[in-house]
Image (cartoon, grey):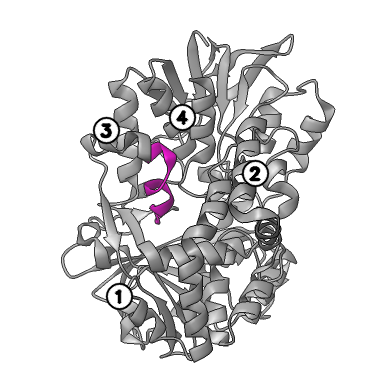
Amino acid sequence: MGGQVVIIGSGINGLVAGAELAAGGKSVLILERGPTPGGAVRTEELTLPGYRHDVAAMNLSMFAGSAFMAAHGEEMGKHGFELVPIQRPFAQALTPGDYVGISTDVEETLATFASDADKAAWRQLMADFPERVAGVGGLLGTPMRRGPLAKFLWSTWRRLGTAGTLELAQFLMTSPRDWLTGTFEDERLIAALSSWGMHLDFAPDVAGGAIFPYLEAMAGQAMGMVIGKGGADTVTNALVAMIEVHGGRIECNTEVTAIRHAGGKVTGVEAGGRTINSDTVLAGLAPKHLARLMGPSGNARFDKGLTTFRHAPGTMMLHLAVDGPVPWKAEALGQFAYVHIGSSIDTAAQTYAQAKAGLLPATPVLVVGQPSVFDPSRAPEGKQTLWVQVRVVPAEIRGDAAGQIDATDWDAVKPAMTERVLDLIEAQAPGIRDRILGQHAVSPLDLEAENPNLVGGDQLCGSHHMSQNFLFRPVRGFADGTTPVKGLHMIGAACWPGAGTGAGSGHFTAQALS
């Protein structure tokens, strides 16, 4: 590969690809339409001065364990990348005053379980985790290319045998509810783990979703969680520095308006009122935007796949500046990085169905992040920042499941939904409203306006349901990031292995081009 590599978008996959290619001696130019790099991995003072809020991603565990970090962690450290380890990664707030919590101290974890049988099942899962994660985690770390995939399948079969390999395949197709109810008996624990499926568009009864509650539960127990020192943007800042040290460039406020190609080969892009020639372009774009910028690719099935790619329901964000600790009714909740609020697995299923029907959920599942408990640099002394994800909400509102909100325009709905969210938190933390010093609500449409890749406020850049995951993400036959246009590659959360901070698609593509 010769000439300049052009990367569209400075999200984490674009930055990882750019850093890896630049470190390998390639000439790299990253074009970013926004004013700052980072995409969904940024930190800003959204409420009051001195309160640093992660605008979207908060948990950096996937990045910490990524192949990119394994190769470049030492250099990232030299550029200021720093993590904060957390021993109590998540908990579920149930009936006010009751909770289930996952800690790296197994006895502390088990003390919140109500069933002896579940405690035994948990210990067995922990014992089996090293072997099973080699299969599940190995798949997520394998490019969807013939050679690497064949090697993974062969090694898995040799290690597990036919029966074990088929068992793993069956698990990968199982819904969260089927796995959880077949493994545990305590509805409280089942609720606690099912909430993780909602992070990746897996409602309790969606096939293929069991993998995520399983991985988060076992990884949380075994390793805890990590967040960025000072904010998630510690990753972005270090990647930018790494790119620039190796001669790469990032141009912000530069929107790509067209991807040029001729004779089945990419020739460059139109951006900022000029033509930038390149025979290698990496597009970190939602499929519909890739289709819009490139036009017909010459492959009708590929083009249709881009336009019919399905996005997950939207997310609403609520950022809070708080005067002191959260007054949780169950005081131990103040020691966890994430607190999910949701009473049962059935509540989660109902919430998802309501959002998919275009209704504002009556009791949305909440993810309350408490980063400043572990990283005091994110708030003034004695204060806290809270990061609240509202899972899941519709981008286009057809009504309100609770029958309380008449408006269907998000600008009008945002204040009422903010109060609904605060009511749910208040039930678990009486008096929280009195401690709020500043707040900043972000609707699904606000998310998309700031970052067009978050279509309809979908922070995953596409559903991970089985019909568009693995070999089908984003389009069957192109799960390796290639396109029908030679030299044009897809990266980003819409590509395998999907959403999160692991930056797998950026790393895979950079490796293939090196």
**N-terminal label among 3 and 2:** 3
Pick the residue in front: 430 or 281: 281
Sequence-wise, the earlier of marks 1 and 2 is 2
Report which residue position mark 2 lands on: 153
10 Å crowding of disc 1: few (<14), some (14-19), many (20+):
some
Instruction: Tell me whether the residue at label 3 lies in contact with that at label 1, contact meaning CB atoms closer than 8 angstroms.
Output: no
Amino acid residing under circle 4: Ala
Q: CA distance from mark 4 to mark 2?
A: 26 Å
Residue 9 among those drawn in magenta: no
Rendered residue at 44%/82% (across/down) = 100
Mark 3 or 1: the one toward you: 3
Question: Which residue position is annotated with label 1?
Answer: 335
Residue 408, quarter of the rendered image: bottom right
Which amino acid, by three-letter code, is at mark 2?
Leu
Q: What is the C-alpha distance between the residues marked 3 and 4?
A: 15 Å
Calculate the distance from the C-alpha at mark 1 to the C-alpha at mark 2: 41 Å
Q: Quadrant of residue 244?
A: top left
As displayed, is residue 124 above or below residue 501? below
Left or right, 385 with respect to 357, comes to left
What secondary structure is marked by label 2?
Answer: helix
Q: Secondary structure at mark 3?
A: helix
Residue type marked 3: Glu
Say what secondary structure mark 1 lies in: helix
Residues drawn in magenta: 58-69
Amino acid type, mark 1? Gln
Mark 3, other Cα within 10 Å: few <14 / some 14–19 / many ≥20:
some
Residues at marks 4 and 1, CA–CA distance in whole angstroms = 36 Å
Residue receiving disc 3: 75
Tag 4 residue: 17
